[in-house]
Amino acid sequence: MGGALEPRDRRGLILPKWLPPALLLLPAALVFGGLFVWPQLGLFATSVASPPPIGFATYQRFLGDSFYVAVLVRTLSLGACVTLVCLICGFPLAFFLARLESRWVPFLIMIVSFPLWVSAVVRSFAWMVLLLRNGLVSIWLRDAGLAPAGFQLMYSFAGIVIALAQVLLPLMVITLYAVIKGIDRDLENAAMNLGASPGRAVCLVTLRLARGGIFAGSLLVFSLSISAFATPSLVGGATAQLMAVAIYEQTLEINDWPFAATISAILLAIALSVALVYGRLIDGRNVPVR
Amino acid sequence: MSASTSSRTINRRALFSLAGAAGAAAAGLSPAFAQAQFRGRELVSSSFGGPGMEIMQRVVFDAFGARTGARATQVPLLSAQAFARMRAEKDNPQLDMYMFSGGQEVTAKAEGLTQPIVGASRMSQIPANLRDPDGHWVVWGVIAEGILYRTDKIANPPTSYADFFRPELQGHIAFPHITNGYGMDFLVMLARMNGGGERNIDPGFEAMKRLRGASIFRAPTDVQTLFSQGDIWMLPYDAATAVRSNRMGLPVAFATPREGAPAVFLTACIAKNSRNAEMAAQIIDGLLGAESQIAIAREVVWGPSNPTVQLPADIAATVARPDQLAVLDRDAINAARPQWAERWNREIAGG
């Protein structure tokens, strides 16, 4: 891409091509290496040390136990549900904001980001008020005949999805907003000139060109929801049998650090592979980045 | 004393150390030197947060600071987190002193994370079963667990853990998650009530399964929310939370169950390799003193561990008597904790 310009220093000397990018990457690489990769390696070493020196007993214990496999599956489906809800609610909102020609747009985006400003504990309290048996939402659902008597959304999987989707929605909207904003409107107009209905034009043109944003936003929401701890444990109570909660319990309550390290290594491996597979599916590489 | 009155520039700390030196000399001891050597040093302890921590700060930590010119502070950390931190900072402890409520001090001592408390003279006043034989930890307060209930919803107050099974209360019961210490003790008490106990937990699980439909919560702060929503009428928790709920205006009372109120012992210990061990020992001595023990009993209903402390009658009425306490076998519980937690996650939480 940048081959046309040779980086030169002030005296006109040609620098090795790799040097400027390397220097630019250095600060982030140092922070990432020191604060993520190195501890992660330590964690991995802890997870493969039972029985010592090298053993995979904790992995066998996790993968051979239907209870923990269910925890894993539940965590992944939580991530999928939250991502889907955020995508369905977030895309129209981001599209609306991106197409809105108003000086209020920055203000509206600020409003969208509000959930991120509130601590997880306070937010979960608010959800408790709505989702408990005597809470508004649970009452509405029962009155509408959608839920049996005594039903409450609090301490349920659906409650966790709702609470997580609320806090992660801004990330989806802001990511999509930036991408949709960068899509040339004339492309939609051209599609409509050629006979597409407005809805079809959005599907054929905007949605496709926004694939990179959809990928980035989904990945962000997915990875944050499978690793979320505070909101699920507060809203989900005992039903929050998820990977992050299991890690917390094994680390702090049961003090089985090798097993906790194993669970987090598995979570990381699965999150990475989901990201790779998802990236392939949506093929973000072919989308022009603007 | 004429020296201090003649000079108006003398500062308060100097006055205190002077008074301390005079007092020590009068008592025939020599801690004056020790007092002076703490000046400018800083001690940090873990604590449980909330009003209990504020009282201890005022009555013990700040008083120690004023007396010695040192700084003594607390950071709120739940026992499990505190223990994890103690373990992680084993070689270079950032906290000098730890407070535990879940029996972690026993594990900490076994793992070599503590050191003997030397120089806390009141340790000898504490009954032998409330302190480590080697002096590594000491109990400074006792929490009584029992039954919290809405006085406006429940006409005849609960007297036993069996009341959780009253048919008219079905759907209005909550209890804490097993990883909350009170949730664990609830399981043990249900087992005891049904012919089991710490070493035979099956009846506890069987009984808890019959509480299907109860709300299970993790966060301690959920207690007030659950009660204020009006849907939950009864749950197992501690007397201090009943008092706090009351002060928030909730019609909640505490009942001591017939089977006994499970006792939670609040302990203090000093981190191995702490550079401020002598200071920590003095703080612990302060926690065992009458002023601190009475103030804590008054404000947060944590009972005294020092039998020489006489509670004023009005406070004594709210604090569970020693004969009302059920002393659980914490060693057995701690040893079984991982298995019970796993089993609980499978059999109870699954819903």
Image (cartoon, rainbow, N blue to C red):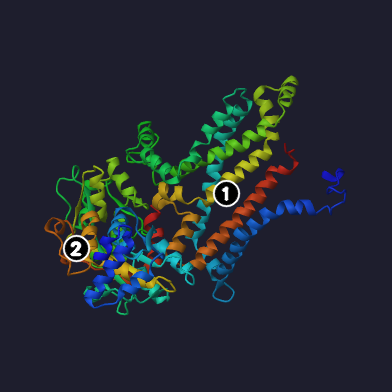
Seen in the image, is A104 located left or right of residue B202?
A: right
The x, y position of residue B275, in whole percent, is 43, 71
- Image quadrant in which you'd find residue B136: bottom left
The type of residue carrying mark 1 is: Ser
Q: Pick whichever, B271 or B279, lies toward us.
A: B279
Q: Does B200 appear above or below A147?
A: below
Task: Say which residue appears at 29% left-offset and 79% top-offset.
Answer: B133
Query: Which residue carries the number 2 mark?
Result: B259
Label 2, label 1: how many angstroms apart (C-alpha)? 47 Å
Tag 2: amino acid: Glu
Disc 2 chain ID: B
Position of residue B279 measured from the top left corner of the image (x, y, whole percent) = 36, 69
Q: Quadrant of residue A54?
A: bottom right
Q: Which chain letter goes with mark 1?
A: A
Asked whether residue B127 is in view, the answer is: no
Query: Residue A37 occupies which quadrant of the picture?
Result: bottom right
Residue located beneath label 1 in the image = A223
Q: Residue at x 75, y 23 (%)?
A: A190
Quadrant location, the C terminus of chain A: top right
Of marks 2 and 1, the one in the foreground: 1
